[in-house]
């Protein structure tokens, strides 16, 4: 009897483990892209709010080109009149702070029903800090030269749920725990792009599928050839073999947050890593057809003054920086389009004529206003030639994997701002705007109509509890039964 039950349990566990995943319905989208963009690269950094990195933008600099400051578009930030609490700037030569308190509960205390005055109680006094041009000038230069959104929001929780929303349009967890539960890989962007033969790769410090958030996707092993290292990415850029969609991520594998800018790590290391990638792509054959999206997974508990909206029925979290680097990005442009973690997947689906991944992605706004696909620039070229980051004094590393040197006393303030690539008076577009465009406004088709997550029986808490109870009961009853038989 006991042997029969054991065989049955093992059989069920094996079936649950190896059952194939159901595939979504098939559509035949147009293989051509809707825009000149043939390559999307997403870089998602860690744990900084908009005001924490861009609160003093574009002020607080001591460059010889300070007169340019009056022509730089200014977002809603700490320079906007208002009561911003007891904030203090991170001193010049310092590139990190104590890690603010994080999590669903802490962020809701910070938010305080939209009053944005609970940060000290929720995330601690270290949340009331902000960086300036002395630390963030390289990112400020990208914002000045290309396009920035001032209304990009995270989910009001930690890293893992935000990254899962970005890759799958939903999350089965509300904080940094798990897996389980798992998400079927067929319900992710990985599954959708593969289904429609749109090439993609996910790049980590070293090739691995064992680290968050990839470890949340059941079946990701079937795409092991799509997971590569940062050095693989660099090689693809140089060799003109970049896939259509690339996720280049500073978290996971063996990076341990070193490159992610997540506190208490130095933001400089991640900043230089980011600059390496941007510079590499800019000066490659891929530049003329590429859009690089740089954003942050969540605010990390740092102060931000703007109360996040309810969008498509969901309460969003803190504002985070969002940059578009592309030959088709508008220069010195500030967008007010309300974006969320589904907006980049939505652009990918839009650009490659795919159905929206799911209803969340379908309803997410796409910041098409940040692009200019219509006006010729120098010598009739549609799009802009790359800028030279090293000429601005940005110390680009020699390799995508590097060891940061001493940052003591370093001050980037003198390098910002820089001359505009196109004179402000010659721009063929406004320097600010917004869009309310989403896939749901043009197409109701969904790749995944109903999301689901699951926990294998052998990882289910109830199953484990039953096994323990059974084991205890067996240890108590088995000697009794043996004595009876004897």
Image (tube, rainbow, N blue to C red):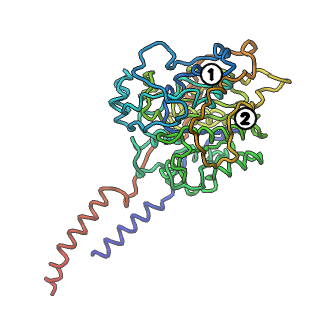
The reply to whether discs 2 and 1 touch (Cβ–Cβ < 8 Å) is no
Residue 41 in sight here: yes
Res 378 quadrant in image:
top right
Query: Which residue is pictured at 51% across the width and 57% down the height?
Result: 20
Vertical side of 199 occupied by 437: above or below: above
> How far across and how far down the image is residue 402, in percent?
63, 48
Left or right of 285? Residue 107 is left
Checking the image for residue 390, the label placed there is 2
- Mark 2, secondary structure of its residue: helix
Q: Which quarter of the figure is the N terminus placed in?
A: bottom left
Query: Which residue is pictured at 41% across the width and 31% down the height?
Result: 127
To which residue does mark 1 refer?
Answer: 62
Residue 363 in sight here: no
Left or right of 295? Residue 87 is left
> How far across and how far down the image is residue 249, in percent?
58, 44
Left or right of 418? Residue 213 is left
> How far across and how far down the image is residue 3, in percent?
31, 76
Q: Residues within 10 Å of mark 1 (few under 14, many from 20)?
A: some
Left or right of 482? Residue 225 is right
In the foreground, 225 or 261: 261
The mark tally for this picture is: 2
């Amino acid at each position: 009897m006991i042997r029969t039950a054991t065989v049955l349990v093992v059989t069920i566990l094996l079936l649950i483990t190896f059952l194939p995943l159901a595939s979504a319905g098939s559509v035949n989208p147009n293989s051509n892209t809707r825009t000149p963009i043939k390559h999307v690269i997403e870089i998602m950094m860690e744990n900084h709010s908009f005001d924490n990195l861009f609160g003093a933008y574009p002020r607080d600099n001591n460059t010889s080109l300070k007169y340019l400051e009056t022509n730089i578009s200014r977002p809603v930030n700490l320079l906007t009149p208002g009561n911003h609490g007891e904030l203090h700037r991170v001193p010049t030569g310092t590139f990190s702070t104590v890690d603010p308190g994080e999590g669903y509960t802490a962020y809701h205390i910070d938010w305080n029903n939209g009053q944005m005055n609970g940060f000290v109680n929720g995330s601690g006094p270290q949340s009331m800090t902000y960086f300036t041009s002395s630390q963030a000038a390289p990112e400020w230069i990208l914002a000045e030269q290309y396009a920035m959104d001032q209304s990009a929001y995270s989910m009001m929780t930690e890293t893992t749920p935000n990254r899962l929303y970005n890759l799958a349009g939903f999350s089965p967890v509300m904080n940094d725990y798990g897996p389980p539960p798992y998400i079927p890989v067929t319900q992710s962007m990985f599954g959708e792009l593969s289904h429609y033969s749109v090439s993609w790769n996910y790049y980590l410090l070293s090739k691995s599928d064992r680290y968050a958030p990839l470890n949340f996707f059941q079946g990701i092993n079937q795409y092991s050839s799509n997971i590569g290292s940062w050095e693989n990415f660099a090689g693809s850029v140089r060799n003109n073999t970049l896939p259509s969609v690339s996720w280049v991520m500073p978290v996971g594998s063996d990076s341990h947050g070193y490159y992610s800018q997540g506190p208490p790590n130095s933001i400089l290391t991640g900043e230089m890593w980011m600059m390496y990638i941007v510079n590499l792509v800019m000066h490659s054959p891929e530049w003329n057809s590429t859009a690089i999206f740089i954003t942050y997974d969540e605010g990390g508990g740092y102060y931000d003054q703007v109360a996040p909206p309810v969008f498509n029925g969901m309460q969003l979290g803190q504002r985070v920086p969002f940059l578009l680097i592309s030959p088709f990005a508008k220069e010195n442009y500030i967008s007010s389009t309300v974006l969320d973690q589904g907006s980049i997947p939505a652009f990918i689906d839009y650009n490659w004529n795919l159905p929206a991944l799911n209803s969340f992605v379908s309803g997410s706004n796409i910041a098409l206003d940040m692009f200019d696909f219509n006006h010729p620039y120098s010598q009739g070229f549609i799009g802009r030639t790359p800028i030279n980051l090293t000429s601005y004094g940005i110390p680009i590393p020699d390799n995508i994997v590097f060891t940061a040197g001493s940052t003591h006393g370093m001050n980037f303030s003198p390098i910002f701002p820089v001359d505009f690539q196109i004179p402000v008076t010659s721009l063929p577009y406004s320097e600010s705007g917004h869009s309310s465009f989403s896939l749901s406004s043009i197409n109701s088709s969904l790749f995944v109509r109903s999301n689901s997550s699951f926990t294998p029986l052998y990882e289910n808490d109830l199953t484990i509890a039953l096994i323990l109870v059974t084991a205890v009961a067996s240890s108590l009853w088995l000697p009794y039964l043996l004595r009876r038989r004897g």
